[in-house]
Amino acid sequence: MPSIRVLLADDQHLVRGALAALLSLEDDIEVVGQVSRGDEVVAAVVTATPDVVLMDVEMPGIDGLAAAAAVQATRPATKVLILTTFGRAGYLRRAMEAGALGFVVKDAPADALADAVRRVSRGERVVDPTLAASTLASGPSPLTGRERDVLVAARDGATVADIAGRLFLSEGTVRNYLSAAIAKTGARNRLEALRTAEESGWL
C-alpha cells in the first residue's frame, strides 16, 4: 500500500521537526517536504506533489488560509489539513471557505493527528468537535472582505493615509470602512475593533 505523502508548513522549526518525527513513526505516512513560510507552500506542492499539506494558520509571507486557497487553485488533488494553536471559530469558517478539508488544534493527541491525515487524504472532512460547536454558535464574520483588508492594514498602527496608499483607496473610503468595522465589532475605536476581530478569527 503506497504511503500518504505529507508536506509540513509551519514557521516554528521545533514544531515542524516534532511533527515530522511523529508522523514518520506511522508506517503509511511519509513526510516529503517542509516549509516555514506561507508563500513557499505552492512551489513546494508543485515540486513534492504531496497528498496532504499539514499547515499552520499564522506564518510569514501569506497566512495558512490564503495558502490553502492557493493550493486548491494550483493542485486540487492535494488536500489541506489546518493545524493551529489558535482554535478560533472564525479561522475554521475561513479555512473551509479556502478549501481546507480538516482543521485540528495542535494539542490533539498524536494518534488523532495521524488519523486526521489519513481521513483527509481520502477526501473526508475532519474538524475538531469543540471548535465546530463554537463556530456554529458564533455565526459568520460580520466584516466584508474590504473591511477586513482595512483592519489588517491597520495592524501596525498605520495612518489612514498609509492604509489608503497600500490598498489603492481614497482616505474617505478607508475612513468609511474603518467606521463600519468599528460599528460591526461593537468597538469604541479601531484598536478595539482589530483586537475583537483577531480574537474571533475574522482576520
Image (cartoon, rainbow, N blue to C red):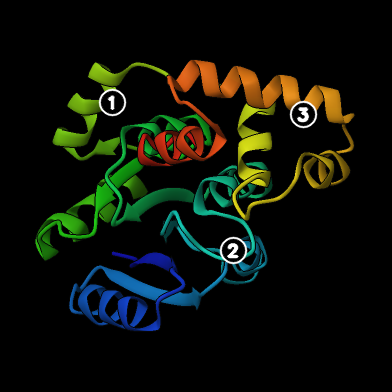
Q: Which residue is mark 3?
A: 174
Q: In the image, which is nearer the foreground, mark 2 or mark 1?
A: 1
Q: Which mark is residue 41?
A: 2
What distance separates the C-alpha of mark 3 from that of mark 1? Answer: 29 Å
- Tell which circle, 2 or 3, labels the residue nearer the N-terminal end: 2
Q: Residue at x 50, y 16 (%)?
A: 184
Is residue 30 placed above or below 105 in the rendered structure? below
The answer to whether marks 2 and 1 mark residues whose Cβ atoms lie closer than 8 Å is no
Task: Name the foreground residue: 188 vs 105.
Answer: 188
Image x and y of residue 29, in percent: 29, 69
Q: Secondary structure at mark 3?
A: helix
Image x and y of residue 65, in percent: 52, 46
- Residue 135 visible in image: yes
Q: Which residue is mark 1?
A: 135
Image x and y of residue 40, in percent: 63, 68
Is residue 64 placed above or below 127 in the rendered structure? below
> Quarter of the image containing the N terminus?
bottom left
Q: Is residue 148 left or right of residue 65?
A: right
Q: Which mark is residue 64?
A: none
